[in-house]
Image: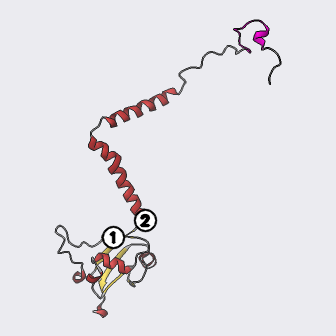
Amino acid sequence: LAQAGPSPAVRFGNLLAPPHPTGAMAALPKRWAWSFITEGVKFRAGRLYETFWNSQSNVKYTVIFIYPGALFYVRWRAETQYKYNVFVADKQIEPDSTQNLISSWKNGSAFYFPAMATVKELKETVYDGADKVPKAVRAGCYGRMMEDSDNLALAVRTFCRRDPKIVLWEEETEK
């Protein structure tokens, strides 16, 4: 509340005295009981910054771009695509790998597809094009056959007991 009239210091004629007593309170301490924690953290952060700033450029760019980029890509792929391991049961229907100079077809190869992919798209990807897919090739797992128009994710969930190991074989009746 505002006081009417002059302040108490002026009333008593002492211009240097404060208007109300502050007691025996001294200046606030600069160090507290736990201030060593914040000081240690600041020191370590500064040392880390200086070490990083003065390090070789290849280390800097690896830490800043390559590691986070790789982590982001793996996380993004895991969140947006499903992984399927493809096995080919018959040697005569293995994908043509004569163009590969380093490796040939390997059973259990991993293929990644979005949630809306079909079995036909899986076959086309394994054989590198729709024209290279043999006529009598069928896909399935645990003895159940999938149609070409089936959604791959739903078929694996239903037929394969959520085990994404898909087997390609040649149907004998359609040769």
Residue marked by disc 2: 80
- Three-letter code for the amino acid on which mark 2 is drawn: Thr
- Three-letter code for the amino acid on which mark 1 is drawn: Phe
Which quarter of the rendered picture does the N terminus lie within?
top right
Establish if 91 lies above or below 81: below
Question: Is residue 65 toward the left or the right of residue 30 in the image?
Answer: left
Residue, far top: 13
- Tell me which label, 2 or 1, sits earlier in the chain: 2
Percent across and percent down for residue 61 are 31, 45
Residue at 33%, 37% (x, y): give it: 52
Residue at 18%, 73% (x, y): give it: 99
Residue, far right: 4
Label 2: few (<14), some or many (≥20) within 10 Å? few
Q: Gap in Å between the C-alphas at discs 2 and 1? A: 13 Å
Percent across and percent down for residue 45 are 41, 34
Q: Which mark is residue 111?
A: 1
Q: How is the image coloured?
A: secondary structure
Label 1: few (<14), some or many (≥20) within 10 Å? some
Residue at 36%, 53% (x, y): give it: 69
Q: Nearer the viewer, mark 2 or mark 1?
A: 2
Establish if 38 lies above or below 21: below
Quadrant of the image occupied by residue 139 = bottom left
Whether residue 8 is in magenta: the answer is: yes
Percent across and percent down for residue 82 are 40, 69
